[in-house]
């Protein structure tokens, strides 16, 4: 938070790269089929992805009743992935013992089956459970109504008076269908990437909810000692939140990506550390430039901002939230930037930290060797008191923003 105020504040508003589009769903549009008649005449099918789940949907011209898909009667709707490949996977939906079953090669997999309407079924499942990896896939759908009697490779529904087929003729009402009739549809399993976090609740906080959790935060980096902080945190097995000065991010993309890979949180501490409490358009530009720099380096857009010097105000907080962030102050300040000695830094933090504490420290902006040296005793003492260390977004219960990437 504290640092010498730069002699000259750069007020120029520089162009900010447009935000990369972060789609959380892909595919899933309906492929429709011409009417063929029969009890389970599918009118359309769809396969898409929403966040981590694949979503398979099938629509019929008649209600899809449990009886129609009864496994004992041979009823099923099957999704075949890469049907022509040696690694073809056949995923079949049916009713067994009054419940939906979605099976891969006869083995039930975890799936959420719903009927948004009587004529439609929707199955959600994890690609990994169906042995699917990211990449292009071909798929088709096979459907058979329960009670179907096959005649000469085709089938007809069984009526009260027996199969409605005439010998030597085509069945009047087919009860098996394949969509598409020939070939397959093109689809894709996307890789899911965490692209940010979603700031909710209060737009400015100085602590988290009262649980036995605390958040270590480091301001004014990335700087020369930041890698040393990261390796110490790694050896202690705790995460931290790094509030970074945007103009220092350039050339350190690998370091920032390592932060995220290590479980730390990357966060915004303005572009060049001015007083921002008065707000105004210049403040918005400080926020957006820094988020753009962090996003360009990591693909991750921060949802946490810490105002330099703790200088805040209503207009600033409004601008912070308008950019999808929360203004994060602190509840514990050891004044480590004054270099009171690592023992003093540790004892101040250990004595001031309570449930939900947000602990302020510095990894940049000056000599931070004392702050680094204080870290092991802080972590050991607070763990002994029963505290768990979390990132600020975790402390505040923010959910992750996911996006799909090729
Ligand atoms: Zn600062």
Image (cartoon, helix red, strand yellow):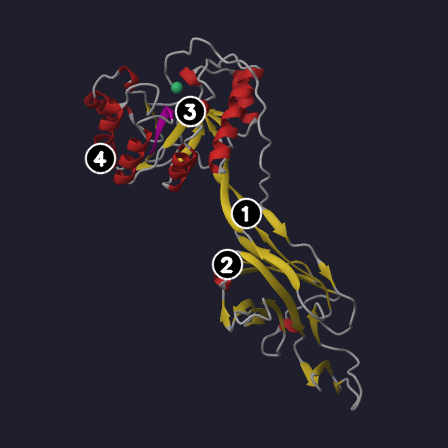
Q: Check disc 1 and report its element: helix, strand or loop.
A: strand
Q: Is residue 116 left or right of residue 323?
A: right
Label 1 neighbour load within 10 Å: few <14, some 14-19, many 20+ = some
Q: Is residue 265 visible?
A: yes
Residue lying at the far bottom in this picture: please name it: 167
Give x and y (percent) for residue 373: 22, 27
Check residue 21 in the rendering and tell me which mark sits there, or answer none.
none
The answer to whether 206 is drawn above or below residue 87 in the figure is above
Nearest the camera: 406 or 219?
406
Query: Viewer-nearest of labels 4 and 3?
Result: 3
Secondary structure, mark 3, is helix
Of discs 4 and 1, which sits in the foreground? 1
Cα distance in 3D space between marks 3 and 2 = 37 Å
Q: Quadrant of ligand 1?
A: top left
Q: To which residue does mark 3 refer? A: 248
Q: Which residue is mark 4?
A: 380
| Circles 1 and 2: CB atoms closer than 8 Å | no
Nearer the observer, 233 or 322: 233
CB contact under 8 Å: marks 2 and 4: no
- Label 2: which residue? 133
Residue 387 visible (yes or no): no
Using the numbered discs, state the Cα–Cα distance from disc 4 to disc 1 in whole angstroms: 39 Å
Residue marked by disc 1: 405
């Amino acid at each position: 938070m504290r640092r010498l105020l730069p002699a000259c504040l750069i007020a120029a508003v520089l162009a900010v790269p447009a935000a990369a589009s972060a789609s959380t769903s892909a595919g899933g549009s309906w492929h429709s089929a011409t009417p063929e008649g029969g009890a389970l005449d599918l009118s359309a099918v769809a396969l898409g992805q929403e966040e981590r789940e694949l979503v398979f949907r099938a629509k019929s011209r008649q209600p899809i009743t449990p009886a129609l898909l009864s496994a004992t009667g041979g009823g099923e709707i099957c999704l075949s992935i890469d049907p022509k490949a040696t690694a073809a996977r056949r995923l079949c939906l049916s009713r067994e013992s009054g419940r939906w079953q979605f099976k891969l090669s006869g083995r039930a997999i975890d799936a959420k089956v719903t009927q948004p309407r009587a004529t439609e079924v929707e199955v959600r499942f994890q690609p990994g459970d169906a042995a699917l990896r990211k990449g292009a896939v071909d798929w088709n759908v096979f459907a058979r109504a329960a009670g179907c009697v096959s005649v000469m490779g085709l089938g007809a529904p069984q009526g009260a008076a027996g199969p409605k087929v005439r010998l030597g003729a085509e069945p009047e009402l087919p009860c098996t269908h394949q969509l598409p009739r020939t070939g397959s549809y093109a689809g894709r399993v996307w890789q899911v990437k965490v692209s940010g976090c979603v700031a909710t609740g209060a737009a400015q906080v100085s602590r988290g909810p009262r649980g036995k959790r605390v958040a270590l935060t480091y301001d004014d980096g990335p700087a020369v000692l930041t890698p040393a902080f990261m390796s110490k945190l790694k050896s202690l097995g705790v995460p931290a939140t790094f509030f970074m000065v945007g103009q220092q991010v350039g050339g350190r993309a690998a370091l920032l990506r390592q932060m995220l890979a290590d479980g730390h949180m990357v966060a915004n501490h303005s572009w060049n550390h001015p007083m921002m409490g008065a707000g105004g358009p210049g403040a918005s530009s400080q926020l957006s430039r820094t988020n753009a720099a962090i996003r360009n380096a990591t693909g991750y857009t921060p949802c946490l901002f810490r105002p330099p010097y703790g200088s805040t105000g209503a207009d600033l907080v409004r601008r912070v939230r308008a950019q999808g962030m929360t203004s994060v102050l602190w509840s514990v300040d050891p004044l480590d930037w004054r270099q009171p000695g690592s023992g003093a830094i540790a004892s101040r933090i250990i004595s001031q930290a309570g449930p939900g504490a947000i602990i302020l420290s510095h990894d940049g902006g000056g000599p931070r060797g004392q702050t680094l040296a204080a870290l092991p005793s802080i972590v050991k003492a607070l763990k002994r008191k029963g505290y768990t260390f979390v990132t600020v977004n975790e402390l505040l219960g923010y959910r992750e923003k996911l996006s799909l990437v090729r």
